[in-house]
Image (cartoon, rainbow, N blue to C red):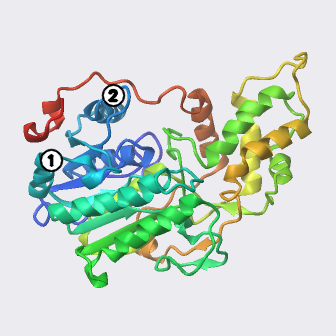
Amino acid sequence: MSYARDGCSPSPRPPSIALKSAAPKSLLLTGATGLLGSYLIRDLLLDGRKLAVVVRRSRKQSAAARVEAILVHWEETLGKRLPKPVVLEGDLTQPLCGLDADARRWVASHCDEVLNNAASLTFRGSDRDAEPWRTNVTGTDQVLSLARETGLRHFHHVSTAYVCGLRSGRVTEDELDVGQQFGNDYERTKVEGETRVRAATRAAGGFLDSATIYRPSIIVGDSCTGWTSTYHGLFAGLRLGHTLLTRVVKGTTSGPALLGLIGVAPNDTKNFVPVDWVSAVIAHAVQTPPARGTTYHLTHPEPLSMDTVGRLIQQAVEAYSKDASPDDPDLCDEQWFADNLGTQLDIYKSYLRNDPLFDRSHTAALVGHLPCPPLDMPSLMKMAKFAIDHEFGRKSPLKTAANPSPAASTPPSVARS
């Protein structure tokens, strides 16, 4: 199997160490409906791994319908049927993830490890009862509590490379809290969540046999197709450029110059990684028992310069966004654009700072056969076009699936109405 399944040149992916004899049970997955989660569903099912997913009901769809929409997308893309994961309707912020006694008994009988992929990307939040604390800390606590009660002894946890906070220089995979300062509350919550996972291991006096930590940098779209379902990080600047450049005449402004006006140095670098590669690495590690108990920086070996990001914003909006009319009485000048971009991107400034050097020794040893795809201008433009075409999430990339029968994906003993 390779992680390039949608038309790009595939990289060979040798089979993971077989788990059928050692781990015949299901993997319990959280965060399944997010961007990375949807790819993990695909890759783990293609690897032959049984899955159970804890999913929250949305305002418009049941948990089962949300998962079915993801399956329909992948089945149409791959041209093949996928096994159905077991869907457990719950809420990570509730005690024991909101699962009732029947559901917990089912997990105890049918699952043997958990992959906690749920996360809030909210950057600021002083209220610990709100996001990002609610999901990244309270949610992690509840997944740990569920694991303890149901006997899950191997815990996989998706953190972030930005637990490093405002550090500079080289950051190793084994380091966590070294007294660093933080750029936002998201980083604080991810350090706290990761600390709690580590504290739950037997080595620290807890109950887990292993805790495996995955720290991706800023996840962007699919390296082959540009497909994405979330629009953070790289897409935040692109979205504002797309919106605001409809107010100025094409060619009167410069993406790199505008980033400079909000305090970003062109030689500073940011680390972006395509979602398909991140998913492939995690799926491989989950399927490889010797990989357990290690922390992995899922970062790109060639980070992007902010000059490249600025040129991407400029080229993408000029190629794909609606032109402003020179006769529009509401046209504004470049300084207006820069002022508004700076104001609206203020919350992201901490993410636009220059990155440290993320050591990737553990990751390279595990997945040297899975090189991270290059993020060149053609692949970045493909991502930008996908984002603009889908109006940065206003047009869903997933089709609305018909409500499936709960029994089709949920065991009768834990079926929800």
Q: Residue at x 78, y 23 (%)?
A: 323
Vertically, is 188 above or below 362? above
Residue 286 spot, x, y in % from top left: 29, 62
Question: Is 306 on the left-hand or right-hand side of 114?
Answer: right
Vertically, is 94 above or below 405? below
Residue 129 spot, x, y in % from top left: 46, 53
Residue 249 placement: quadrant: top right
Q: Which mark is residue 135?
A: none
Query: Dot 1: what SS?
Result: helix
Q: Which residue is mark 1?
A: 103
Residue 171 placement: quadrant: bottom right
Question: Is 225 on the left-hand or right-hand side of 337?
Answer: left
Residue 162 spot, x, y in % from top left: 56, 65
The answer to whether one can see residue 368 in this image is: no
Query: Dot 2: what SS?
Result: loop
- The kind of residue tagged 1 is Ala
Q: Which residue is mark 2?
A: 61
Q: Residue at x 45, y 63 (%)?
A: 159
- The kind of residue tagged 2 is Gln
